[in-house]
Image (spheres, rainbow, N blue to C red):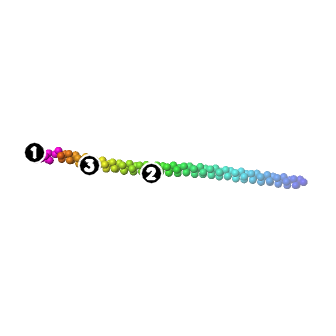
Amino acid sequence: QLAAAERTQAELQEARQELRDAQSAAQQHQEQLLSAANTAAGAEQAQAQLRDLQKQLQEAQEAAQQQQEQLLAAHGAAAAAGSRADGAQKEVQRLSAELAAAHSPDDADPAE
């Protein structure tokens, strides 16, 4: 009986050690799962931030495109205004020349 009790005691100790090993392995596995879950959550958050940044970039590009179109339109309007101003200046010079010629003594009637 004593030998059987000692064998049972040894088996019990071995079973306890196996249980401790299994508990330790389960705890390590749980920590790995938690780490993986945190990594996945971090990746999801990074993807959301990336999507937000891409949206902001697209909006900035659209705004820049609109500004460029407005600048081109303003440049065209300025060029047209400059052209009209040149035309008006030439017209003023022509009229001034006509006025000067009309009052010039060279054009006076020699019969006078």
Q: Are marks 2 and 3 in contact (CB under 8 Å)?
A: no
Q: Which residue is pictured at 65% across the width and 51% down the height?
A: 37
Q: Which residue is pictured at 44% across the width and 50% down the height?
A: 66
The amino acid marked with disc number 2 is: Gln
The amino acid marked with disc number 3 is: Lys
Q: Which residue is pictured at 59% across the width and 49% down the height?
A: 45
Q: Secondary structure at mark 2?
A: helix
For mark 2, what is the residue?
65
**Closer to the N terminus: mark 2 or mark 3?**
2
The amino acid marked with disc number 1 is: Glu
- Furthest toward the right, the residue is 1
Magenta segment, prevailing SS (helix, strand or loop): loop
Q: Secondary structure at mark 1?
A: loop
Quadrant, the C terminus: top left
For mark 3, what is the residue?
90
Categorize mark 1 by other alpha carbons within 10 Å: few (<14), some (14-19), many (20+).
few
* Labels in figure, total: 3
| Residue 82 placement (x, y as % from top left) | 32, 48
Categorize mark 3 by other alpha carbons within 10 Å: few (<14), some (14-19), many (20+).
few
Task: State which region is magenta.
Answer: 103-112
In the image, taking residue 2 as reference, residue 59 lies left or right, namely left
